Image: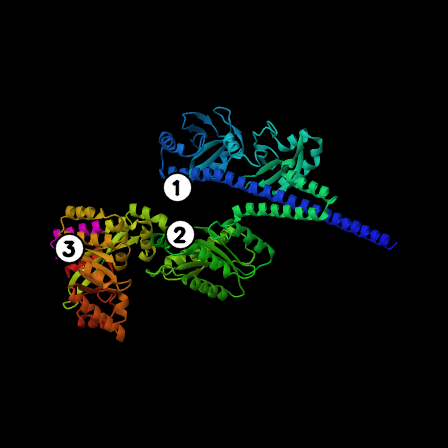
């Protein structure tokens, strides 16, 4: 009886355990199904996002190219169709357009294949005549009745639209792009308008053939699609992403995403069976195993779930994990940033960071060491993050960070600590090299949600920090943005100003310190607008240096000085040497020496009346090339002046090896003459120059006390407001006659 009760108890226990196992497995199966469905949706989303990037890059890239071509044609001014078509024929093979064409305001289109058509009633022509770059809906080509999309851009003259540049793009080309195999060849893609009308259909054999409207095709395919059609209409009308399941012989997923071009949507389609085969298999096997061995089922299910998670993780790693550092990619960073903004964080700081002159690390230590540095930087940034913060790497040595703060000073303090940690990395046993991280900081404004704009602001601050050369970070301000806009506008105007003869030469006299007689002058470029307004050299000279345009300005000043000296010689005036500045950018093109010598010979001015000035800092960028260029100039007979001595990294060995005739003492030295240490330094420089037979010119002399001190210590010539400011040619000529 007791054994019977024990047997009943054991049977009940086993039955109860099996029931619990069955219930557990049933719950697990339900959860597994939901997770796999979520994975399906995420996979569809990821594929759709990749397709969107491809299409956007193709369309937006072609439209941008057309706009650039239109701007170039606009810059040509008034030209006839033949000239414009010749230009288009030369460049159209670089792009994926079917052909290109041009029409004036009458709407008569002339193409690069010598066809002519009236497009005056086309929507794209009307839009571009209103000054708008435009992408048309699918059209039938007037030339050969092929289905096309037309890109158009206005051509302007003095702000007025004088014509339209047109470029048709084959719809079949987009079909080919979208026909790239996905989901092992089972998936395919449409592009439709909000009202369901086809933009691009699919060539896939299981797609709607000859589709004109997605809603109509779904309705005609299966009566069960009524609800799916209504749901799809709502998704398109709301302009959002979403998915429906419809039937076209078999059940299919249809995932919809706004394309971001016109009012178009990308629709990715894949059979339900293909997406759910794996999940259905897992679930069915789970139920079968439940009846026999619950524990084994649990183990198998757990293993399968882990495998699915690993698959999902591998997919995510491809998109979101940086291969080199193991951290976030920029794409992942943007997703996390959007999430933080939408949730609750208010005080957010975006940081853009890189290593100044990182290329030198690769050049000096090799790429393996460079990669080690990047991994160390990525690890340092990650370890500095607190709860809710994160980092990402965009490319090369560029990283981004999101930091949370209560007070802005906390961010600055943390940036300095991060910089200190990065600089602790030791690169070489034999060569001392200190990494120099540079940061741009942007504090998000309340309610701001445009991620790209915020990252751009951090980039602006980062660029300003790199330009400073001696700082670790810069904080974004509206003034920075205004300066960047002014800088861009000014940069665009420099070439025009040069052609318009707005640049003029000013002369700042130099006087003999003992006789106070005119001993020379320095030629300085000035920008005088047509209205007489002067543009500060501090604004346009750095821009010219950055773009390389400064070489053209230097040559212009050199030529003008030679011509002026010749005029004064012909007038019988007692001319004195005039020095002309030589930019460091000339080191990239030593051929300028022959050009300068030819200009001087053509003018007929003796070479002793033209001197060349080079800044001290230029010596350290390309030392060997610099020495060779200076020696060649010296051999030709040019006197060489070293400008701004003391503001860079002066080297006595450099002075020994470079043929310098005159050393110009920077104003910062002159200003400190009444300081005991400053006076000692000036006296030391004077003695050194005398020992090396180098003459000294003091710059920035403004007071009589400065003048008297410099004269007492043996300074040869004086330049500064004490004697004269920079002046136009006419005033300088008066000085020479005095």
Image spot of residue 465 (x, y percent)? 40, 58
- Check contact, mark 3 vs mark 1: CB within 8 A: no
Q: Is residue 156 visible?
A: no
Query: What residue did someone put label 2 on?
Result: 368
Quarter of the image for the C terminus: give it: bottom left
Which residue is at the far bottom?
676
- Residue at image location 72% in from the left, 41% down from the top: 288
First in residue order: circle 3 vs circle 1: 1
Residue at mark 3 to residue at mark 1: CA–CA distance: 45 Å
In the rendered image of this protein, does residue 302 appear above or below residue 129?
below
In this view, the residue in front, 515 or 472, is 472
- Residue at image location 55% in from the left, 46% down from the top: 314
Query: What residue did someone put label 1 on?
Result: 158
Task: Give the extent of the magenta segment.
Answer: 558-576
In the rendered image of this protein, does residue 548 appear above or below residue 67?
below
Which residue is at the far right?
1
Q: Which mark is residue 609?
A: 3
User: Residue 520 occupies which quadrant of the picture?
Assistant: bottom left
């Amino acid at each position: 009886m007791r054994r019977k009760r024990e047997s009943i108890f054991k049977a009940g226990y086993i039955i109860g355990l099996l029931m619990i196992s069955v219930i557990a497995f049933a719950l697990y199966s339900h959860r597994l199904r939901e997770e796999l469905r979520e994975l399906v949706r995420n996979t569809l989303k990821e594929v759709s996002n990749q397709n969107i990037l491809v299409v956007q890059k193709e369309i937006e890239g072609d439209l941008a190219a057309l706009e650039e071509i239109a701007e170039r044609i606009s810059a040509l001014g008034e030209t006839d169709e033949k000239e414009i078509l010749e230009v288009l024929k030369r460049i159209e093979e670089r792009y994926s357009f079917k052909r290109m064409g041009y029409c004036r305001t009458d709407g008569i289109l002339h193409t690069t294949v010598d066809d002519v058509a009236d497009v005056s009633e086309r929507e794209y022509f009307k839009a571009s005549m209103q000054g708008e770059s435009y992408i048309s809906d699918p059209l039938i080509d007037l030339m050969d009745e092929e289905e096309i999309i037309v890109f158009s851009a206005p051509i302007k003259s003095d702000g007025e639209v004088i014509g339209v540049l047109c470029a048709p793009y084959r719809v079949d080309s987009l079909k080919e792009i979208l026909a790239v195999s996905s989901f092992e060849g089972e998936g395919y893609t449409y592009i439709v308008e909000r009202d369901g009308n086809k933009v691009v259909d699919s060539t896939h054999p299981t797609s709607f053939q000859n589709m004109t409207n997605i809603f109509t095709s779904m309705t005609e395919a299966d009566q069960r699609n009524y609800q799916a059609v209504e749901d799809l209409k709502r998704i398109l009308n709301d302009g959002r992403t979403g998915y429906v399941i419809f039937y076209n012989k078999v059940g299919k997923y249809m995932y919809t995403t706004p394309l971001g071009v016109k009012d178009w949507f990308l629709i990715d389609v894949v059979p339900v069976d293909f997406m759910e085969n794996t999940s259905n298999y897992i679930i069915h096997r789970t139920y079968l195993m439940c009846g026999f061995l619950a524990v084994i089922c649990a183990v198998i299910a757990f293993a399968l779930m882990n495998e699915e998670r690993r698959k999902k993780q591998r997919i995510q790693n491809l998109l979101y994990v940086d291969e080199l550092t193991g951290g976030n990619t920029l794409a992942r960073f943007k997703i996390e940033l959007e999430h933080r903004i939408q949730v609750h964080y208010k005080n957010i700081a975006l940081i853009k960071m890189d290593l100044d002159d990182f290329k030198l690390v690769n050049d000096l230590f090799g790429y393996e060491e460079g990669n080690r540095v990047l991994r160390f930087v990525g690890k340092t940034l990650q370890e500095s993050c607190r709860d809710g913060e994160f980092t990402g790497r965009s490319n090369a040595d560029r990283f981004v960070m999101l930091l949370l703060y209560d007070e802005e000073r906390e961010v600055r303090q943390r940036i300095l600590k991060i910089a200190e940690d990065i600089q602790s990395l030791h690169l070489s046993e034999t060569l001392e090299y200190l990494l120099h991280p540079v940061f741009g900081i942007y504090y998000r404004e309340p309610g701001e949600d445009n991620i790209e704009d915020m990252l751009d602001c951090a980039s602006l601050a980062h660029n300003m920090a790199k330009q400073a050369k001696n700082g670790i970070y810069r904080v974004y301000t509206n003034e920075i943005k205004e300066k960047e806009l002014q800088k861009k506008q000014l940069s665009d105007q420099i070439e025009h100003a040069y052609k318009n003869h707005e640049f003029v030469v000013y002369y700042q006299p130099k006087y003999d310190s003992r006789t106070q007689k005119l001993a020379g002058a320095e030629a300085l470029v000035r920008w005088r607008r047509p209205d007489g307004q002067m543009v500060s050299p501090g604004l346009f000279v750095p821009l010219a240096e950055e773009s390389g345009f400064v070489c053209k300005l230097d040559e212009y000043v050199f030529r003008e000085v030679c011509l002026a000296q010749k005029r004064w010689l012909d007038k019988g005036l007692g001319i004195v040497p005039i020095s002309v500045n030589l930019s460091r950018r000339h080191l990239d093109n030593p051929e300028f020496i022959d050009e300068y010598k030819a200009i001087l010979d053509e003018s007929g001015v003796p070479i002793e009346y033209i001197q060349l000035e080079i800044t001290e800092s230029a010596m350290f960028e390309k030392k060997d090339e610099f020495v060779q260029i200076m020696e060649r100039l010296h051999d030709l007979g040019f006197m060489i002046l070293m400008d701004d001595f003391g503001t860079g990294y002066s080297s006595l060995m450099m002075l020994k090896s470079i043929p310098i005739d005159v050393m110009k003492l920077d104003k910062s030295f002159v200003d400190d003459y009444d300081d005991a240490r400053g006076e000692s330094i000036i006296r030391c420089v004077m003695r050194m120059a005398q020992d090396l037979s180098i003459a000294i010119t003091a710059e920035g002399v403004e007071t009589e006390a400065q003048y008297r001190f410099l004269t007492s210590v043996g300074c040869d010539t004086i330049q500064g407001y004490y004697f004269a400011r920079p002046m136009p040619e006419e005033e300088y000529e008066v000085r020479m006659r005095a």
